Amino acid sequence: MSERDDGGSAFPRWSEREENYGMSLRDYFAAKALNALLSNRFVTILESAKSPEDAFKVMVELAPTAYEIADAMLRTRKS
C-alpha cells in the first residue's frame, strides 16, 4: 500500500519534535471541503432526518467526499 500524499504541514513551523507540526494540508483541505459540503446541505439533512442519529449518519457519509476533494486540490497544486 503506497503512502498517500498529505501535502505536508498545513501550518509549518520549526520544531525539534515532529508531533508539533499539526495537521496535514490534506486534513486542512478536507476540513474546509467538509464545511462547505455541510453548509450547503445541512438544513436539508436535518429536515429529512428522522432522528439525530440519522442526521449524523448522513454527515459521516460526506467525510470521504471531503477527502476526495482534498486529494484533488493536492493534485492540482502539483500541476
Image: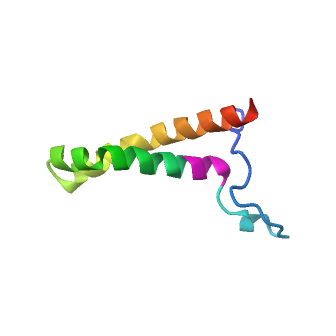
Residue drawn 59% across and 53% down? 28
> Which color scheme does this rendered protein use?
rainbow
Which quadrant, please, contains the C terminus? top right
In this view, the residue farthest toward the top is 79
Rendering quarter of residue 74? top right
Magenta residues (range): 24-29
Dominant secondary structure, magenta: helix
Is 25 covered by the magenta stretch? yes
Is 16 covered by the magenta stretch? no
Residue 4, percent from left and from top = 68, 38
Q: Nearer the viewer, residue 57 or 37?
A: 37
Residue 60, percent from left and from top = 37, 46
Residue drawn 40% across and 44% down? 37
Relative to 17, is 6 above or below? above
Residue drawn 51% across and 50% down? 32
Relative to 65, is 24 above or below? below
Residue 7, percent from left and from top = 71, 45
Residue 48, percent from left and from top = 17, 43
- Number of marks: 0
Residue drawn 82% across and 69% down? 15
Which quadrant, please, contains the N terminus? top right
